[in-house]
Each structure stands twice: as C-alpha cells, then as structure tokens.
Amino acid sequence: MTTPEDPRLPVIVGVGELVRRPGEHDDLPTEPARLMELATRAALEDAGAGDALLARVGLVAAVPTASWGDGDPGRRVGELLGIDAPTIRTSNQGGNGPGVLVGTIAQRIQDGTLEAGIVCGAEALKTLAEAMKRGEMPDWPGADPAREPGEVLEPDSPANTDDETAVGLIAPIMAYPLLEQAIRVDAGRTPEEQVDLISGLWSRFADVAAANPAAWSRETHSAEEIRTVSPANRQVTLPYTKLLNSNIQVDQAAAVLICSAGAAQELGIPRDRWVFVHAAAYATDEWFLSHRRELHRSPAIRACGEAAFAHAGVTADDLGPVDLYSCFPSAVQLAARELGLPVDDPGRPLTCTGGLTFFGGPGNNYATHGIAAVVRQLRDAPAGTTGLSTALGWYATKHALGIYGNEPPVRPFALFAAEPDTPEPREVAEPGNYRGTAETCTLIYDRGGEPSYGILFAILDDGRRALGHTNDPEVMAAMAAQDILGQPVELRADRSFTPECLTGASR
C-alpha cells in the first residue's frame, strides 16, 4: 500500500459488530444504546488505538432506533463512552441513514473540520417483541422522542399518499412485492421464472450468512426450500414467502470508526486496518411509489453510481466486495440493474453479510453492518481492491452509496448529492369507474396462509395510474392462480377491480 499524500484522507480504521441470538450471549445487555456503546468499543479494539482514538472523536452519529425511540440516541452513547462530543443523526425512518452518515463524516474529515467520528446503531426488536408478549416492557432508560441532536441531516416525511393507504399499501412489506412484479414484467419472465431467479439469489445470500459469525441466522437454505410454502415458510405476500422477507426481529449492533489518515498515522494504527473512503453519493427517487413513472427503475441509484464511480475512477467490473441493500429481492435487482451488476452470477456475490433475511434486518442500521463487512473483506483483498456498499430507505426511495478501497484514492474523497434524471411523476387517478391495464399487483396473506386482500396498480389509456383494492375471494384466487398483469382490468369507484379473466363470469 502506498503512503497517502493527503493526511486528511478519510479512512475507516475500526469496525465492530454484536449479535445477541436467543440463548446465546445472554451476558450482553439488551438496551440499544448499550449495544451501540459495546459495538463502538469493539471497533476501537479492532483499530488497536483504544482510548487514544476515542479522545479524538469529534462527532457521534447514531442511527435512530425503532425499539428505543429517543430523538438523540448518540447523546446516551457518548455518555456511556465517557465523551462529550456533538451528535448527529438522519431521519427517524430510513435504512439509507448509515450511508449518509459515513459519507458526511468522511467529507468533514476531508475538509479538515473533523478529525474522527463514530457511526453506530443498534436494534433490539427481538427483545422488545418477547417482552411485549409477556405483557412487559424492557427495563431500558426512558426514550425522549422530542429530544433533538446537535444536527439532523434529513427530515421525516410520510411514506404514503392517502390513495396508497386506502388500498392497503402502508409498509415496505406491501411495497416491495409490487416492485418485484413490475421488474418481472419488464424482464419478460413468467411468475415461475421470477421465483426461480430470486430463490436462487436468496439461497446464495443464505450461504454467505451461514459463514458470517455476526449473522442472526447461520443456516443454509436451498432455492427449493426458499420458494416452497411450508409451516415454517408461509406465504407472506405474492410472490414472497417468509424466507424472501427481511427479518427485523433481531438484536444486533454495529459501529464504524472513521478518522483522517494523518490521525491514524499519529496514533500508530496498523496500515492493514486502514480502508479508505473513496467516494459517496446520496439521492432520492420520486417520493411516493404510486407517483413513479416506472416501477422497475431507480434513477436515484443510477445517479449515485455514476457520480461515485466517475470520481473514484472505477466501474462495476472493477469492484471486489459488494454489499447491496437486501431487504427484499426487488431492492437487490433494482440496484444491480442500475449499477451494472449481474443478479444471476454465482461467482459475483452481491452481499458481504448474507442479507436482511438471514444476516438480519436491524431496523435503520443494517447498512452499518454492510459497510463493516465490506471493510473486513477489503482488508484481506489484494492491494488496489475497491468495494461498494449501498443503503436505502422506505420503498427504495432514499439511497446512499459508498466506494471503499484498501489503497489511497486517485483523488481526494468527495460526497455527492447526486441529481437523478427523474421523469415526470405519473398522475394518480381519483377513484372512479375505469378500464385499464394491470401494471403490478400483490396479495397480502394472513398467518394462516390465506389471502386477506389484494392491491393493484393499473395504467389507464390516458397514462394515469389507478389504484385498486380487493378482498373478493374470486378475484384473489385469480390473482394467485394466474398472471393477470398486462391484462385489461375494470376498476370501480369503490376501488374494487375485476381482471379480464373474470369479466362476464357470474359474480
């Protein structure tokens, strides 16, 4: 590794992860802030500089936690670490947060306004869920949602329009299957072909998690097991079984320590611990899902990739370790397409952790683990290797991306507010009597394995999008049994709909 000429280059020098699996590591605390503290201490130990590095930390960036909704989680983390550093966070909802925070700290280090910073996060939703089943609450310090950190990088915004909420689109679990179906139609695949593709992809992710000591689940799963409905793998939505969904009920924590190359050298941090942050970018797609012109594309991911690749002087073909945000298969496919990566190549893994189904999906903080995993692989890679980590929030809405390398970058680090070439939003029609073409759809299943309701997006002749909802058993059976996408569909003012295959049937 060559000696960096610029002592302000940002380098990741320490990463730490904790996982508190059921029946394991019972000595670990469950409080999210304590888990963040311990993950940070693990990162300090990983760097080999301990308290000397901690004393130089000028910013604590804590990712907001769903299980402990304090408005300034970094304040308690700092107190537990024994430092009085300013705090910063991103929005309360958004898995893009870790990528944005790492990029922000790296830019301030490059600018010379910061010497070292911490990005940390934790989730303890498994502990919270178990306590609530017992009618209890965990014995954690009271959270103050109104408490504000020194800085908030992005505002909170509602995820859904009233129209989306009216048809039952209220959470990621409903949105990503709609994206999946749109991706399939654009690719010209049958439902069976699409399920084969994503089950194979997820099986390879499970193999990676099985070899990762920090993963929540370390079991391998075949593609057949992932796509087959069983008591342990119920149908959650169309087309996702449980093993194709993110697992948020985990207790996990991660931390990343970033400092200037000059500080790392002064502290004697071994060079084999250094990973340079080459470039980072963030961008937002059309905010509301139903307003997006095309559901199978992400102009924001493409813009992030173009900006960061150009600055770092690399292409997708040059990358070593890659970790694409993997809450659902559609998220991976969107990113892979826009960044120029294959989704069906067993020799080109798209995860370093094992993904949010198997590694675990700790709320907003997964991407901190993704960055840590990329850093570890880069440390062991041949000199000159670069890696990529992505992050996203809401419905593949907010995006962040970072490029890292085990040698100094070709030019100083830069953080880009990328500008997507976003087409005009698609107008959503008011509820009414229409005839359109089924664009995408999903079914939401209950825990007994029966469909409870269906959601439809349809394109009208004038280009507007109409949203539909059904709990009609006959319509839901048709949605489950055959491919209604691309078919004519009748929509009514009460938002119900009938696909062409049922038109004229006794109703």
Image (tube, rainbow, N blue to C red):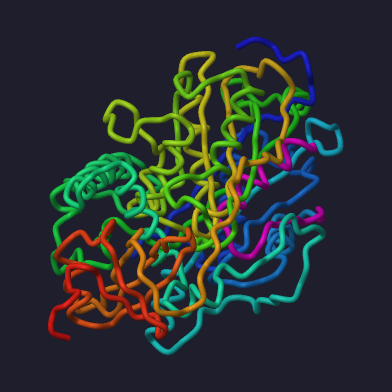
* Figure quadrant of the N terminus: top right
Relative depth, front residue between 440 and 426: 426
Which residue is drawn at the image coordinates 56% and 65% (left, top)? 32
* Figure quadrant of the C terminus: bottom left
Which quadrant holds residue 213? Answer: top left
Give the mark count. Answer: 0
Q: Position of residue 186 (x, y in %)?
A: 34, 45
The stretch of residues the image draws in magenta is: 84-108
Which quadrant holds residue 494? Answer: bottom left
Q: Is residue 456 left or right of residue 5?
A: left
Relative depth, front residue between 348 and 211: 348
Q: Position of residue 163 (x, y in %)?
A: 51, 75
Question: Is 118 part of what is drawn in magenta?
Answer: no
Q: Position of residue 18 (x, y in %)?
A: 48, 52
Which residue is drawn at the image coordinates 41% and 37% (left, top)? 352
Residue 44 position (above or below residue 63): above
Relative depth, front residue between 138 and 90: 90
Q: Position of residue 281 (x, y in %)?
A: 65, 38
Question: Is 98 part of what is drawn in magenta?
Answer: yes
Which quadrant holds residue 320? Answer: top left
Relative depth, front residue between 290 and 148: 290
Find the residue positioned furthest to the right. 113
Find the residue positioned furthest to the bottom. 135
